[in-house]
Image: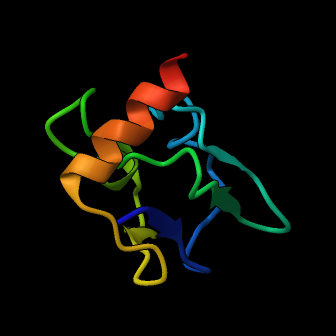
Amino acid sequence: MALKITYDCIACAACVEDCPNQAISEGPGIYVIDTQRCTECVGFHDSSQCVAICPVDACVPDPDHPETREVLLAKKETLER
């Protein structure tokens, strides 16, 4: 499933540079993740980089966007074109 950023976000931008899909951008007051671009770093890293780097644990699974590993890999391939 794609990830989302909760309102616990302190807008430090630590996650932005680590996202291989450029799925994270500044939103109103907090950063947001574009679910169309988020692959949870599947195909790039062993774990989601935003989750690993976030100092306040604001990056969490988005239950509104469940996706299998296969779907995430297919999304990665589409984004690379």
Residue 4 locus on image (x, y percent): 51, 68
Q: Residue furthest left?
A: 46
Which of the 4 quarters of the picture holds residue 54? bottom left
Q: In the figure, is residue 6 to the left or right of 28?
A: left
Residue 34 in view in this figure: yes
Q: In the figure, is residue 25 to the left or right of 9?
A: right
- Residue at point 72%, 65% (across, down): 30
- Residue at point 33%, 47% (across, down): 72
Q: In the figure, is residue 3 to the left or right of 29?
A: left
Q: In the figure, is residue 16 to the left or right of 32?
A: left
Residue 18 locus on image (x, y percent): 45, 31
Residue 20 in view in this figure: no
* Residue 33 sits above or below residue 48 on the image: below
Which of the 4 quarters of the picture holds residue 35? bottom right
Q: How is the image coloured?
A: rainbow
Q: Quadrant of the C terminus?
A: top right
* Residue 46 sits above or below residue 9 on the image: above
Q: Residue furthest top?
A: 81
- Residue at point 32%, 51% (across, down): 71
Residue 23 locus on image (x, y percent): 59, 43
Which of the 4 quarters of the picture holds residue 28? bottom right
Residue 17 locus on image (x, y percent): 54, 28
* Residue 80 sits above or below residue 20 on the image: above
Q: Nearer the viewer, residue 46 or 58?
A: 46
Q: How many marks?
A: 0
Q: Nearer the viewer, residue 29 or 65?
A: 65
Q: Quadrant of the N terminus?
A: bottom left
